Amino acid sequence: MQDFLFIFVFVIAALLGFELINKVPPTLHTPLMSGSNAISGITVVGALICAQSGEGFLAPALAFLAITFAMINVVGGYMVTDRMLGSFKKRAK
């Protein structure tokens, strides 16, 4: 029963996240990417804790996937933010 609950929460969260991202206007994507870096950092910390305390093969495997995807999000977010901030710098003549 508990596994069903976890799967249900995951599916609802995925659908809600997809709908929310689709409703965001393009002008707000970059600031939201910057904010999501903090959330992804928390995901990395939580996945590290789960990898250490989990039993069996499934917990470390899922923790590895969570760390991988969260780090991709963090690095991509910082790259986009850096590019956005670079567009506001004055160019040398």
Image (spheres, rainbow, N blue to C red):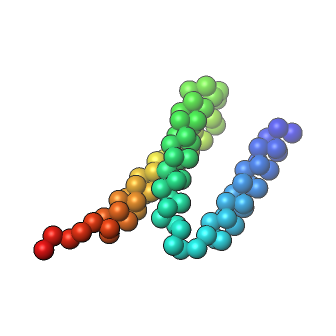
Q: Quadrant of residue 54?
A: top right
Q: Position of residue 2 (x, y in %)?
A: 82, 38
Whether residue 73 is visible, yes or no, is: no
Is 12 situated left or right of 32 in this image?
A: right
Is 52 situated left or right of 90 in this image?
A: right
Q: Quadrant of residue 20?
A: bottom right
Which of 43 and 35 lies nearest the eye of the viewer? Answer: 35
Q: Is residue 57 above or below residue 22?
A: above
Which of 73 and 4 lies nearest the eye of the viewer? Answer: 73
Q: Quadrant of the N terminus?
A: top right
Q: Is residue 22 above or below residue 37?
A: below
Q: What residue is shown at x 53% (from left), y 35% (from top)?
A: 45
Q: What residue is shown at x 65% (from left), y 71% (from top)?
A: 23
Q: What residue is shown at x 63% (from left), y 35% (from top)?
A: 59
Q: Quadrant of the C terminus?
A: bottom left
Q: Position of residue 81 (x, y in %)?
A: 40, 60
Is 35 situated left or right of 82 in this image?
A: right
* Badge count: 0
Q: Position of residue 47 (x, y in %)?
A: 57, 37
Which of 8 and 19 lies nearest the eye of the viewer? Answer: 19
Q: Position of residue 65 (x, y in %)?
A: 55, 45
Q: What residue is shown at x 77% (from left), y 49% (from top)?
A: 9
